[in-house]
Amino acid sequence: KAGVTQTPRYLIKTRGQQVTLSCSPISGHRSVSWYQQTPGQGLQFLFEYFSETQRNKGNFPGRFSGRQFSNSRSEMNVSTLELGDSALYLCASSFMNTGELFFGEGSRLTVL
Amino acid sequence: QQQVKQSPQSLIVQKGGISIINCAYENTAFDYFPWYQQFPGKGPALLIAIRPDVSEKKEGRFTISFNKSAKQFSLHIMDSQPGDSATYFCAAIITQGGSEKLVFGKGTKLTVNP
């Protein structure tokens, strides 16, 4: 069974630009959640989607948004990038309220 | 109330030794406590997990001890090996909350010297 796939793996943007990250969950998993990982703040929850609906959202500004498609694939978007948005963005999928999340390898975003 | 506090921040152990990482939580609604292992350049991977109705769970060299009254849980790695060198995160989640939202500890960087 293929794991969680995130694209792109690495990207460099400049301040003010926007970025879209993609996540393909494990086949059959309907829940997709996103986390931001930085050395200072650790792993912080961004949002979670289930059957195309956002079920929960973390404490991030509105510049961070996401969506989920009917095939459970998900995208997150960050607009008006700031230097502090440089981080590893991790996507995780799960089957259904099991608490067992399977993470992708992440998309490393560098904002210059 | 949503925090999970993890210690130590870093840990150096000799090969064959015991590694112990501790976590504490406040929210008694948490009902599932997983530990994740993360190697450089990789995403976190589920290592072992426990529910609060169990005081201990063992899988190979990895053991979770859970103290519900103290709201603490810990990971013990027996016979630590250099290949165990990674960052370990404890986490907590409310599985009945209708959302898969993990609250993570800050992580412990474990180094096992040969």
Image (tube, coloured by chain):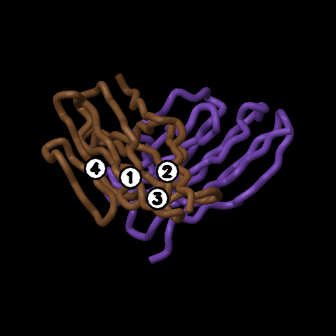
Determine which residue is flagged by label 3.
Answer: B45
Q: Relative to the observer, which residue lies in front, B27 or B114?
A: B114
Q: Residue furthest left?
A: B53
Q: Secondary structure at mark 3?
A: strand
Q: CA distance from mark 1 to mark 4?
A: 13 Å
Chain A shade: purple
- Both marks 1 and 4 on one chain: yes
Q: Secondary structure at mark 1?
A: loop
Q: CA distance from mark 3 to mark 1?
A: 21 Å
| Left-right relation of A65 to A17 | left
> Disc 4 sits on a residue from what chain?
B
Determine which residue is flagged by label 1.
Answer: B18
Q: Quadrant of the N terminus of chain B?
A: top left
> Disc 3 sits on a residue from what chain?
B
Residue placed at 28% from the left, 33% from the top?
B72
Q: CA distance from mark 1 to mark 2?
A: 7 Å
Determine which residue is flagged by label 2.
Answer: B13
At label 3, counting other C-alpha atoms closer than 10 Å, the crowd grade (few under 14, some 14-19, many 20 or more) is some
